[in-house]
Structures are given as C-alpha cells and as structure tokens.
Image: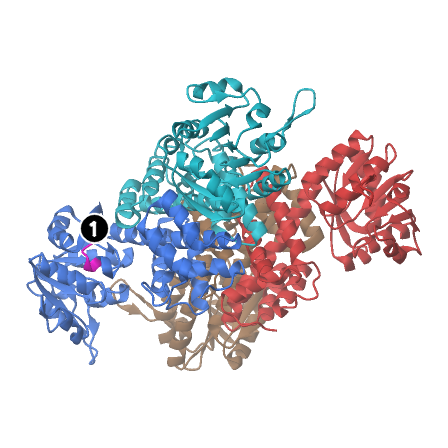
Chain colours: A cyan, B blue, C red, D brown
Amino acid sequence: MDIGFVGLGAMGVPMARNIAGAGHQVTVYNRTRERAGVVVDVAQVAASLADLSCDREAVVTMLADDAAVEEVAFGRPDESGQITPGLVAGLSEDALHLSMSTISPALSRRLEEAHRAAGQHYVAAPVFGRPEAAAARKLWVVAAGAPAQVDRARPIIDAVGAGFTVVGDQPWQANVVKLAGNFTIGAMIETLGEAFALARKSGVEAKTFLDVINNALYKSPIYQNYGTLIADERFDPPGFRLRLGLKDIRLALAVADGAEVPMPIASLLHDQMLAALANGGGELDWSAFARLAADRAGLARTL
Amino acid sequence: MDIGFVGLGAMGVPMARNIAGAGHQVTVYNRTRERAGVVVDVAQVAASLADLSCDREAVVTMLADDAAVEEVAFGRPDESGQITPGLVAGLSEDALHLSMSTISPALSRRLEEAHRAAGQHYVAAPVFGRPEAAAARKLWVVAAGAPAQVDRARPIIDAVGAGFTVVGDQPWQANVVKLAGNFTIGAMIETLGEAFALARKSGVEAKTFLDVINNALYKSPIYQNYGTLIADERFDPPGFRLRLGLKDIRLALAVADGAEVPMPIASLLHDQMLAALANGGGELDWSAFARLAADRAGLARTL
Amino acid sequence: MDIGFVGLGAMGVPMARNIAGAGHQVTVYNRTRERAGVVVDVAQVAASLADLSCDREAVVTMLADDAAVEEVAFGRPDESGQITPGLVAGLSEDALHLSMSTISPALSRRLEEAHRAAGQHYVAAPVFGRPEAAAARKLWVVAAGAPAQVDRARPIIDAVGAGFTVVGDQPWQANVVKLAGNFTIGAMIETLGEAFALARKSGVEAKTFLDVINNALYKSPIYQNYGTLIADERFDPPGFRLRLGLKDIRLALAVADGAEVPMPIASLLHDQMLAALANGGGELDWSAFARLAADRAGLARTL
Amino acid sequence: MDIGFVGLGAMGVPMARNIAGAGHQVTVYNRTRERAGVVVDVAQVAASLADLSCDREAVVTMLADDAAVEEVAFGRPDESGQITPGLVAGLSEDALHLSMSTISPALSRRLEEAHRAAGQHYVAAPVFGRPEAAAARKLWVVAAGAPAQVDRARPIIDAVGAGFTVVGDQPWQANVVKLAGNFTIGAMIETLGEAFALARKSGVEAKTFLDVINNALYKSPIYQNYGTLIADERFDPPGFRLRLGLKDIRLALAVADGAEVPMPIASLLHDQMLAALANGGGELDWSAFARLAADRAGLARTL
C-alpha cells in the first residue's frame, strides 16, 4: 500500500518504521520538517500536508492530542491568516484516514462525519503500549469503523501490533475503549499507592508486598512495572507525563458524563491527579500520584 | 513431622490432604466430628481438641473467621458452662501454632502473646487461592514470625503451596498483607464494574472490553476470571461470599484506621459492598457489587 | 435609569417588576414576544434585541444558561442564515451589560472581553434565591467587575435584592462564587440524604432528625426547606430541576479543574446526580438525588 | 429531686451548676476528687461512687467517652485488683441513670439491659452544644427511652437545655441521632474547606465567600462560627479536638455499618481526619481537616 504517516513522536517513529518494514511505501510528514530526517532511510518525506494527502490510499495519524489531530485534519491558519488545508480537504475520494492517536470520542465523531461528507473513510485505531512496545511491534490495536474499512486497514494494523480487537462499527467506540483502558491503569496505580502505604506503615516493604500480590494473584507484567516504579518512587524521567494522564482521565469522565455513567474511581483519580498537578507534579510520570496515599499516611519520602 | 490440623472446610480438606501427601503424619480435628470422615483415608481423627494438641510438634488452623480461631485457641464453654481448653492451654511447650486463616492482625497479636506466654510458638501464614488452587497445591503462602519458627514451618508451607513470601518477623504482618491483597482484588472488581458500564453504554460488550485490556495490558488470569464473572453477571453460586468479602474489607479498614492510613478506594469498596448487602446480595459472590456500577448507569440486567 | 431587561422566565419577571417598581424606566425583550405581555403594565416591550439595545444606559440579562446568554450577547442566525446582532453589536458606547444569570466563568470572561473591545462595560451579578424570593425582593446579589461599573449597577442591584456582596473586580469571580455556593447546597442535600437514611434505619423519622439538627445546630431556613422536601420525598413538581443542578455542578467542577482544586464532595455530587439522571430523575427537583442514599440502604420509598 | 452527677469536665461543671440552680439537690463525684472543688458552692461531694449511687433518685453521667462511662457504670479494678462497684451495682431499685455523654449506641444498649436487669431505669440524653452553650443553658437535648422515664428526666433536661427532642423509646436511638448530627457538622466543615479553596484560587477571600453564603443562603450561626475558624485557620487552641471528632465519625460509621447504610461523605470525612491525624493534627480543633482541601489545591498557609 501507498501510505502517508503524520506524527513522528516517540510512538510514531517506530510505528512508521514497522509499516515500512512490512513492505509498504511510506511517505511521512511532520510539522517540524527536520524531525522527518529520522525516518529518511525507510520513508519519503512530503514537503507539505497537501503533498502527503494527494493520491495516497491511506494516511495514518499518530499525534499527541485532540488539538494536533484537529489541525492536521481540518487545517490551520498560516502566517498570512489563510487556512492551510488538512486531510479532509486534501485526501482523494475513497481514501482512508486511520487515526491511531488517543483522542476524544467527540473528535472521532466529527472526523468520521467530515471524511464521510468528503467521500472519504475514517477508522479509529488507538493503540496500547509504550515506545518500547512500538519498537518491538508489540502494540495492541483497538479498532472500530465500517467493517470493510477496518479490513482495508488490516495490513497497517498488522504491521505495528502484536494483535488487535475490533470493538464496534462506530470509530468513536475505539476511542472510548482506549480511554476506559487507561482508566483501569489509573485505578491500579491508586490501588497500589494505598496498599503500599498500608504495608509500609505495618513494617512491610512495598516491594515485598508487590512480590506477594504479583506471585499470588496477578502474574501481570504491568503490575510489576508500575508497582516497581511506585515502590521506588522513580517518577522522573516520566514514561507518560501526569499532565497527559490527567487529560485522559478528563476525557474518560467527559465520555462517562455524556453516557450517564457514574464512575467514582475515575472521579477519585481526577481529584488525586489534580492534587498532584497543583503541587508541582505535572511533569512527573503519571504514576506519581500514588505518592499522595503515602503523603496522607504521613510516610517520609523514600528518595 | 507430627502435625495437627484444625478446620476441614473447603480450603482445609485439600490442604490437610497435601500435608499428608508430603509424608507427614496428620491428625485432624473438626468441631462437627462427622466432617472429619472426609480425610480418614490419609489422617487420624482426634476425639477432642485436647487430644489433638498434646504432643503434637505443630498444629495448623484453617478456619473461617476470628471467632472460630479464638474459640480453637482460647477454648469455649461446654454445655455445663465450663471452658473446654483450646490450643494455648493444650499445646506442649515449644510446639508451633501455624495459623493459616484470614484473620485480623489484632487477633494475630493476641495469639502471638498468648503462645509466647505459654512457652509455645506462633507463626501466621495466610494463603492466597481458592479451593481449586488448594487442591492443585497452587496456593501462595504469606508467612511472618520469628525466623527460626518460619523455617520450622517450611515443610508444611511447601506441602500446601506453590510458593511463599516471608514478609516480616511479626506474625500479624502476614495478616495485614493478606487483607491488603484482598483489598486490591476488591479494587479490581470495582474498576471493572465501572469500565464495563462505560463500555456497555457505548455499545461495546463487557467481554470485548475485557479481551482488549487483558490482551493489551494485564495478561492476568485473575482479571480473566473475575472479569468473566462480572461480564456474565454470574454471581451465584458464590466462589467467595460477599458477606465474607465485606468482612475482609472491614478488617482492612480497621487496620488502616489503627495505622493512620487513609484508603479512599477501600472506603468506596466498603460503601459499595454495604449497599449490595442492604439490597439482598450478601450470599452472592463478592464480585456482585460490580453490578452496582451498571445499576447506577441505568443499565438493564443481562441475566 | 433607562434599563433594558432580557429574559422573562420565573426569575426574570419579578425582577423586572421590582426594577420598574423602584422608579426606573424598563424596556423588556423576550424571544417569544407574547411572553412579554406579562409585564406590559410596568414596562415597554421592544420589538427586537436591536431596539432594546440602542440608547439604553444598561441592559440586564437573566437567562437560563450559557447558550441563551451567548445568543443574546453575540447574536444568532435568523431564518435566512444571517446573524441577528446581539448586545455586543447593539449597545451604545459606554453602556453597561449587567449579567445576572448563572453562567460559566469562562463565558463571563468572554463577555467582559467582547464588551470591553466594543467600548462597553460588563458586570456579572448572579443572584441567590428562588422565584418567591425574587418576588419578595429578597434575592442576594453577588457582584464583580470594575468598581465604577459596579457602583453604576447599584440602583438595579438594590431594586431586586435584599443585599449584595462585591467579591472582586473581575466579573467571572462572581460566577465562581455563585457556582461554589450552589455546590454547598448540593453538599447539604447529600449530607441530609445520608443522615436521614441512618436515622430511618435506626427507627427515627427523618423529620424528627431534621427538627433536632435545625433546633440544635443550624437554625437555618434552607436546612428546613430542603430537609422537608427530602424527608417527604416531594421532588415533583421541581423547584429547580436536577438536570439544571447537575449542569451547575459540572460548571463548578470545570472551574475547579482549571484552578487545580480537588473537590471530592463535588465529585461525589456529580456521580450521584448522574446516577439520578441515568435512572430517570432529570426532571425532578434537584434534591431528589438524596433519595439514592436511602435506596442504597435498602429503604422503601415513603411515597 | 435528689440528683447525683458524675463527670466534672468542661461540659459537666456548667451542667451541674444549672441543675443545682434549678433547685435540685446535687451530689457530685469525680474520679480526681480535687476537681469536685469547683462546684462545692452549689453541690455536695460524694466520697465514692458508692456513696453517690445509694438512695439517689437519679444519677447523671457526662463523661468523655465509652471507656469512662463503662467504668462508672460497671465498676473498675482498684489497686488490689478488686472491682470497685459502679452505678449498676450501686443504684437503688427504680433509680434512673440519665446518660448525657456522647457514646456508642452499642454501649447504650448494654447499659439499658444492665440497668433493666438490676431493676433500674436508663435514659440516654446526649446534648448538642459547646461549654459556652452549657453555661448559658442553651444546650439542645436529644432524649430517648421509656416515655415514663423520659418524663421523669424532664426536670433535669429542662435545667440544662434550651429545648429537647424525644427521638424514640429505645435509649440507643438518641445516641445514633447525636452521632449523625455530628456527622453533618463534619460534612459542613469539609464542604467549606473545598469551597474556600476554590474561592481563594479564584482570588476571592474565604471570608468574603462565607459572607455571601451565610447572608444569601444559610443565615446560620454554626456556619458563621466554623466558617470563621476555617477561614482564619485558627485551629489552636481547639474547641473540640480532631482526635475526638474522628472518634465520633468512627462511631457513626460503625453504626452505619451495622445498620447497612452506605455513607460516602462519612467515609470521606474519616479519610480526611485520618490524614490530618497522621500528619500531626490530632490535638488541633477538629475543623482543622478543612485545611487539607487547601493543601491539596497547593495553597499556602494563611498563618
């Protein structure tokens, strides 16, 4: 396939490489053009979004947030105030926009409508996994959209991930699942924070407690990884910034609000992360809010 | 070793069998004597607690709750009002009481003191795992006590479990770890309840969501098992009754209160389980309180 | 003063009457013109918003929500798609827009900027009180804005209320105070719901309990009024709809989020009101969510 | 009436004086006898609890907590290990124990049973109000018990309070009402803490906000008093220690647990007060936990 790829961040670079590695012709675009140099060995570099869009069968977007995706999809004003067109204006008829970023379901709905109105197609396929997993082609992809278009996206999905789940035929459903999944990680972080505080005040080290529950109960790499970060209070440098984690919890709560689903743990996570932010923790790893349980229990910092 | 075993419930029977199977001489006692029949092929049956206690190197207790353990340890009034003596009165000097029940740290402290005063030893070694795991010798044992006594208990621990962790030299610490571990399971149940409600109101089946997070994130049998129970709303017959689960959360909160550890998720679990109890759910599986998130979201029952 | 008044709802009508009654010349405008008839004895009726705006020294707006205020301030498309201009376009230079609706601080900021850019003035002065209080001229007004403009608004404020507090020189601050005030009422509702449930399950009637705390502690008419509504479960017809109460809590949480203030009771109120909404209570009085505490305690409905 | 009075603390002294002032013959007893000196001008001093008990028509107890009341009612070991008898052993047949302390409903049940078995009577009549209110005879009394006995207690109740409410014919019901009433004060404290934090981060002083809501909504002296304490962060010297406030919330939660009433705000208060305790606030006024909302919002201390 002849594939465009927009967004060369920590996730985007290994994903673009893997798509190229699977034998597809890849053309990349990044707002700061120099950044595109990192994949020049496997991909062509488009001079503009317009160049990237035209005649491409599919374009993948892998960007930081709603604002970045909106700009790429709907265009942005240039210096003279004119709107530089985005994917909706630039893609050929019948082309596919495969949106792999973690964005709000609301934006996903708008994108679906806009591409449909332009005679194009839209599939949402956000991913679970960190940069290392992306490099190792071990992402898990959550896809939703019209079945024929999801099928069409399969070669790309296969190229970046270890597996995928199709969760519905409305693209925004995949975005809900991604946000709800991140919510469960947040809940695990808070749970470990509370349990570690209780263990520590009982004279049991956090890591000893983690060993017990992961051997006895969870047998789960994600409990091991996050549990170790929290036990060691190793929140800097961040793997995923608290500021961004809070953004995802806000999006999850906004969806829950619209769907009329009370989520008391999500509300608690919001309050905890907001407290962490208000006390200077926004740039730490998002698991840093687990530290609040220890603070409130009067425990001294371990670092 | 010459080992006494008290408590032939769903957990005790397979544990007693495994101890006998490892080559130890096992003598059992159960309040309702007929019940002892189920292990008569591998164990001797003591006529009384006094018979069980005397001259035994170690006695294991595996009972339902604090009240049952208190009675076995400190005795109980018989029909005539006289106290039938318990383990503390009956055990020989230097004998070991290995307490494997899920009890309060407070009772564990009392037991340690009483046995010490009587020239005996006490090790707490509660287990993680359900009856099937007990039968398959796959329990995980959490032990705490004087190192020499924990070593002495090792053959028994090895006979019933797939592994163990020593968490401290104060027996009650093992009981804290067990309660804190159960708290984390409760937190997982509530988390899944909330996330499933959000998924379902977004048109995504609970099981589809479970597939995503367990493939993408957790890769954990316990998420699979509890997640399936909750998605199917299959709460009857119970694996572990809500009434007992609530008791464990109460004990965890009591420890947290004494140790001055605020645990907001534990407080939430208490409120949810209390609501489930007040609305008739006490005899269902304890994961049934996850149903409340769906109720509050206005979702119809799936069964 | 020559005063325009927009918004003839349950609050607006008595307020407009009181302004006229204080000797001001009042001209009203309402989207559905017939509605203006109810004040024709004391006020002139403008044929359009443009007529209302021009040459007026001050215009008061008292509308239901952000959307209604936005439309009146910034205009709306007519049948032919053209924008009918609003207050910003229509007010004379140096005129004052006195905004008395409960709106978001964010909209208040936008209004302040727009009026300033147009050479006009903007003061926010939301009110506490229900329609009966408005009729009895017993509202309490919370004002914020440039001191000179607040002074200028004083005759209007005095005409509608029993008193007022100036909370700052930024108009949006008054909107924060109004939302935070409504939050405290919501917290009182939930508190009474929980305490009544405990009293009732202890065999003490809710009203008996209310008598105790209001005689012994609060001596407060608002505890009396809301407490009686909740004790009687008299939620229909609504004084203030739950749907609107939830909107105010959402706005409060949005402000708190932006200001980085964790508010766990506000989060709880959001979850409770959302549960009430999801179960069909949106058109009841907003105190109806207190009923959830009784439901969760397994209490039968009293009506 | 010939009345015994036990407990000469900050509340007991003015209450005993008021009873004497109403024309009753008062005999006091206090564990530390010197303390009794403070009322020697109006009351006789008993040498022992036994002296106080015998031939008295009624004995009032006004003590700090369950332990103190238990000791006075059921006796305590003296130096030689013998039990010095308490009220149950010492009161004459048909005498009345009027228990005005804030104690657990569970202890109130035990007292009722013990006095009944001894041919005596028991009425619970805890009070709302601080020492100043006691001195001014402005307490509010919450009474429960057999109607004839409550009538019999009326002269005493009238002598100490400005009014009273009879809430049931089971003494423990009065204790539930007292605890539930204190819970509502705790909820008000947390609510004010959160609202003040939001106001302050919006540039509005806490006291300005308090003025608004108390003028506009509550018109309540207790909002004024607690609100001022919290706004000024004047938590020392304490009016009512946080350690004791937490004890009352624990008792309320214990009752709620037994009655199967989920109380999420009570759970939150418990967690907040526990955090305050763990961080050294146990001896401050109990309203000090409102400070946590400000801390979590990143606000600097005002003192």
Name above or below for residue A80 compared with residue A72.
above
Q: Position of residue D37 (x, y in %)?
A: 46, 60
Between D272 and A273, the one lying in front of the other is: A273
**Taking B175 as reference, is C237 left or right?**
right
In the displayed structure, B230 sits above or below A224; it is below
Q: Quadrant of the C terminus of chain A?
A: top left
Picture residue at 15% right of the left edge, 49% below the top: B150
Magenta region includes residue C177: no
Front in this rendered view, residue A2 or A279: A2
Q: Is residue D24 visible?
A: no
The answer to whether any part of residue B28 appears in the image is yes
Q: Is residue B136 magenta?
A: yes
Determine whether, in the image, residue B16 is placed left or right of residue D294. left
Residue A61: % across, % down: 51, 32
Name the chain letter of the residue that bears numbered label 1. Answer: B
Please name whichever residue, B103 or D107, is drawn nearer the observer in this view of the structure.
B103
Q: Residues within 10 Å of mark 1 (few under 14, many from 20)?
A: many
- Residue A100, how many percent across, how many down? 49, 36
Label 1: which secondary element = strand
Question: Residue under circle 1?
Answer: B143
Name the residue rendered at 65%, 54% in the picture: C245
Is residue C117 positioned above or below C201 on the image?
above
Name which residue lies at 44% across and 32% down. A284
The answer to whether residue A111 is above or below residue C303 is above
- The magenta segment is B134-139
Which of the two residues, A71 or C236, is positioned nearer the viewer here?
A71
Look at label 1 and name its amino acid.
Ala
Which residue corresponds to the image point at 53% horizontal and 19% vertical from the top-left? A33
Q: Count the marks.
A: 1
Where residue D76 appears, x then y in whole percent? 32, 66
